[in-house]
Amino acid sequence: MILRPIRTASHPAQESRPEAIALDGRLARAWVGHNALHVVENGTGSFEEKIRKTVDVVCRSLGVPGPRSQPRWWIVRNVDEVALAALEPAEWKLEHVFLRTSDGSESRVTKKSSVGGGPATYHHRVRGKMVGDEHSTSERTLSLREYKALLKTRDPGRLKIKKTRRAFLWRDEYYMLDTFHSPESASGTTTLFVEAPKGEFSFPPFLEAKVDVTTKHWFSSSAHDSYARTMMLAGEVASDPFDGDANADPRRGAW
């Protein structure tokens, strides 16, 4: 989240309304691509609703139960690269390696490297048992030494997942566009994620939605297992060709 100082009578704003809006935009764009960037918009709902969304973000970031928004995923195609580039997306490469566990949890390490160069960063995430109706989640940043040590516990039954992620802001929503490179069955699949879409949601016009996978039973039932989701996404691309159904293309109506 991006927090700005609260303006009061004793500490008035130093900029006009248009200047404040422009400053907010520059601040948001500067943070695009950060692991913990979340957008809580001003445009819709009451102040209480904004508080609820903020609590939701904090709970998810800490991996503890709390009020939940409904994130959405789509399989997309025909990306207008020129229009997307105009938004100046942050772009990096992700490599997920899944580790052996004995308690049914999902454990994975991730190497995150910038497409433009620079040092890589390393992360370890564990999704554990159910707490209420949510899976407990913990994530931490690793040193290169810790990353290499954890790689020795790699699960040989699970393939490495490689993808390119592009993150961008569009109409006060934060999107992540992932294109998979491996495993081979998922190669070329592109998915779009938005964390907490508004009621009057406007699908980015420079993307073509193939299918809203959030509505699929297999997607919700594998919420704790990102490896299984990737394999099922690949199967969805192969078995469910785009048919122009209104449910598959959210640009045909708000929800």
Image: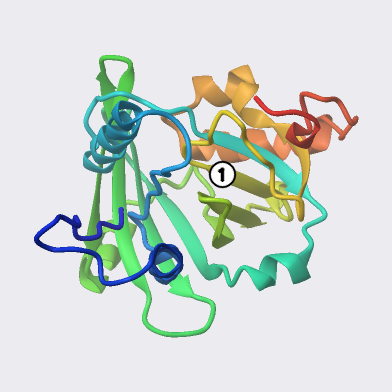
97 relative position to 252: left or right: left
From the top left corner, tell me how far across and down residue 152 is, in percent.
Answer: 31, 58
Figure quadrant of residue 61: top left
Given residues 55 and 217, the one toward you in this image is 55
From the top left corner, tell me how far across and down residue 95 is, in percent.
Answer: 48, 61
Q: Is residue 33 visible?
A: no
At horizontal 78% and vertical 33% (from top left) the residue drawn is 249
Looking at this rendering, what residue extends furthest in the left direction?
10
The correct choice, above or below, for 118 with respect to 189 in the image is below
The correct choice, above or below, for 120 with respect to 137 in the image is below
According to the picture, the residue beneath numbered tag 1 turns out to be 193
Residue type beneath disc 1: Phe
Given residues 169 and 135, the one toward you in this image is 169
Figure quadrant of residue 135: top left
From the top left corner, tell me how far across and down residue 17 is, in percent.
Answer: 40, 62
Looking at this rendering, what residue extends furthest in the front direction?
9
86 relative position to 96: left or right: right
22 relative position to 207: left or right: left
From the image, which quarter does the C terminus lie in?
Answer: top right
Given residues 13 and 95, the one toward you in this image is 13
The correct choice, above or below, for 219 with respect to 96 in the image is above
From the top left corner, tell me how far across and down residue 199 is, in percent.
Answer: 56, 28
Q: Is residue 216 visible?
A: yes
At horizontal 76% and vertical 51% (from top left) the residue drawn is 207
147 relative position to 91: left or right: left
Looking at this rendering, what residue extends furthest in the right direction?
243
Q: Assign a secondary structure to mark 1.
A: strand
